[in-house]
Structure formats: C-alpha cells, structure tokens
Amino acid sequence: MLGIEPMYLQAGGFILAALILGIVFRVRRMYAFEFILVFAVVCGAAFFFTTQVPLLSKIRLDQALKGGTQLTLQAVSTDQAPVTKDRLEASISVIRERVDKLGVSEAQIYGVPTKNRIEVSLSNVTRAEAMDIVRIAYLTFQDAEKNLIVTGSDLIKAQEALEQDGVTAYIHLELTAEAKKRFAEATTRIYGGQSASRQIYIYLDKDLVSAPTVQAANIEDPIIQGYQSLGEAHRLATILNIGALPLQLNVVQANETSASLGADSLRRSQVAALIGIAAVAAFMLLFYRGAGVIANFALIVYAILVVGALVSLKATLTLPGVAGLVIGVGMAVDANVLIFERIKDHLRMGRTLRAALDSGFTSAMRTIVDANVTTLVAVVVLFYLGTGPVKGFAVTLGTSIVISMLTAVVFSQYVLRLVINSGLIRKASVLFGEKEANLSGPR
C-alpha cells in the first residue's frame, strides 16, 4: 500500500521493537538483557545485510575492478574550431550525452582545462566501443567520383533495426526533404550506370564504414548495413543522432581492463582484505581477551556502517579504495588499543575496573582525536587535489576514519559498560589480562 517492500517493513518493525525493549531494559537497569538485545540486533543486522539485502553487491566498482576503458583525449585547434573553454565543456556534454543514451553506467567524464584534455572512464566498455563513443561523427555519403550526396547535417533521425535473419542489423537514416531529393537523384544516376561504380561510400569522419551497392533507382531514405548485432548499430545510431563533437579530439592514451582481469583484481583484493581483518581480529583476541572480543564485535558494526555509507554516498570503490578500507579497520582497532592500554595502565595504578574504564576512555580521547583529525586533513587534501583512484582512496579512508571513531569510542565503551554493569564479567583479568586492585589496598 505504501510502496515499501515487506522485507523493509519487517526490518523497520524489528528496529522499533528493539529500541522500545532497549529503553525498558535501561530504565529497569536490566543490563544483562540489554547486552543480549544489542548482540541480537548486531547479529540480525549482519544477517540482513549479507543475505536479504547484500550491501557488498550494491557498491559501485571502478573499471580496474569491474573491467572497462579509460581514455585521455587531447583537444586540437583547427581553423574551423579553435580550442576554447566553452567548446571543451560542450564536447564533455556531448560525450556525456552519448554515454547516457547508450546506457553505460558508472561513467566518469571530466575536463582538464589547463591541458585542454578530457578524461573518460567507462566501466564494462571495450576499447573499440569507447573509441566509437568519442568519435567526431561527421557523416558523409559520396559516389565513386567523391561527389558529396548528403551529410550529417541533412540527418533528421538514425534508427537501428534487425535484418530479416534476426541477427545482423542495419541503420535507417531519415533525411530532410531536400536531402531525400538529392539522394533519390543520386541513386537513380548511379543505378543507371552514370558513375564509375554502383556503390555509395559512407564515411564517418574520414573512415569508410560501409559501401553498399545501389540495387534500385529513386531511393529516398538510405540505410547502413553490415552490423553484427543490434547493439553495435545502436551505438552508431546514437552517435549520429547526437551529432558531431564541437572540437577535434585526439586519443593520446587508451587503457583497457578486461572484465576477467577486473574480477581477478577484485578477488585478490577481497582475499587480502579478509586476511588483514582476520589477523587484526586474532591480535585483539590474543592481547586483550574479553575486551578483544568486544572490539571485534565493534568491527562488525564498523563494517556494516562503512559499507552502508559507501552505498548511500554512491561512491565508486577503487583498488586504492580497498586499501583505504583495510587501513580504516586498522585505525578502528588502533583506537581500541589506545583505550585498552590506558585502562590497563589505570588498573596497574590500583584503580577499580569501573574507575579504570572511565579514566581510560577519558585519557585516551585526546590522542585518538588528534590522530584521526590529522589523518582527515590529509584525506581532504587528497580528495580535492587528487583525481580518479586517489579520490576513491580518500573517500573510503575518510569514511572509515569517521565511522571508526564512532565504533571505537562510542559503541565499544557502551558495550564494555553493559558487560561490567550486568555482572556478566566481574574480573579485570578476564577483560584485559590485568588483575583488578585489591579494594582494601591503597588507591
């Protein structure tokens, strides 16, 4: 009725019920039940976002991970079209319009005015397809004597269609009334043998794309045949419909990443990330015992929030971005290490577990904030001055740092207090490997 999927309604109901129960447990000081509720909510969220709505599958991947082509285009001045800022921006708009109409997703197109260049990054697009997209697309029809019959300026609409075999395709060109008349006269003349060849030569820019034989006289609307698929014909029809680029653009660099290579890069990155996270989790368990379990529990919350944030921001994950995520995991744990070490120091000073927890978090906060703020400054510089993958690294690392602060400082502290207040763990040695001071001894 509301247009919301039942699955999301169930999740919303679950969250609402958990909030109400959490308030009840907190008011009645039922800390053990509150801890069990938090554990159930986190496990439920992990299950929901890995099976029902897999967040990882919703993250946009760049061409290095998904496969695609990256082009660097150099604008060249001509007598008819000298390079200007307006023409460069117009060329970017035309390329973007072509990309959008072709249905290419996750495209990055931006200009470098200081160098008169345009950078084009297209996912799931081959080099040949990318080269078609950035063609100037100046269409001409000529006879054997190089006489001009019609040009792209005579074109009203280009429409692709399948041949009768249902496999190969052609493009039907709808011309202006004057151009139709010229084309009919040309086909009549060529069919009647008044040309050195019965072929019409179709050029796109300076490339011969087709040379069909005239099989009848008085043809008004031409077709371009010989395409192996409807998609191939659709690409050219789209380029012709949008028109020529305002500038002459030369391809100075073209890098193609195959889908298989991108998948292999992604697989290797995932394996490296899993190994790194597993090593960090093992370190926390080995050195901090019960507190390490809580820190690893907080890492689950961290992972859900980071991936959810990247999906919400529609960020594109790059190979350096994967590195940024792993570094973020390390920084999240680093904050926990600082806090736990401060707590252990205060336990050695003779404070009780509760007192050491309060003072440990307080004394570690300044160091944590300083460390993360300085890293965020570097992230901002990378984002504004970097391009492409460097920006991807900055986005993922910056997101990781902000969320790691929340999970390490807020969530870890919250769960630790629940465990201590509930009485589930009473000994400091179980949580931190340090014995709590004897209450009868000196403070």
Image (tube, rainbow, N blue to C red):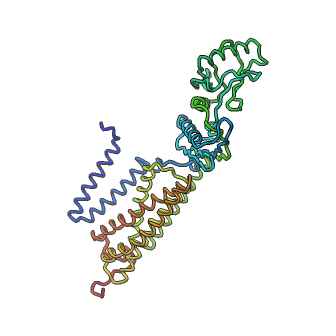
Q: Which part of the image, by quadrant, shows the N terminus?
A: top left
Q: Residue placed at 66% from the left, 12% from the top?
A: 218
- Would residue 298 appear left or right of 267 to someone viewing this image? left
Q: Residue placed at 55% from the left, 59% from the top?
A: 272
Q: Is residue 12 above or below residue 229?
A: below
Q: Quadrant of residue 405?
A: bottom left
Residue 259 pos. (x, y %):
60, 45
Work out whether residue 140 or residue 438 is closer to the camera in this orientation and state it: 140
Is residue 270 among what the camera can see? no
Q: Residue placed at 32% from the left, 72% from the top?
A: 425
Q: Residue placed at 62% from the left, 25% from the top?
A: 170
Work out whether residue 230 or residue 297 is closer to the camera in this orientation and state it: 230
- Would residue 362 appear left or right of 222 to someone viewing this image? left
Q: Quadrant of residue 151?
A: top right
Work out whether residue 8 or residue 190 is closer to the camera in this orientation and state it: 190
Residue 183 pos. (x, y %):
66, 17
Residue 169 pos. (x, y %):
62, 26
Residue 42 pos. (x, y %):
36, 57
Is residue 156 among what the camera can see? yes
- Would residue 133 appear left or right of 348 to someone viewing this image? right
Work out whether residue 226 or residue 114 is closer to the camera in this orientation and state it: 114
- Would residue 53 appear left or right of 424 to someone viewing this image? right
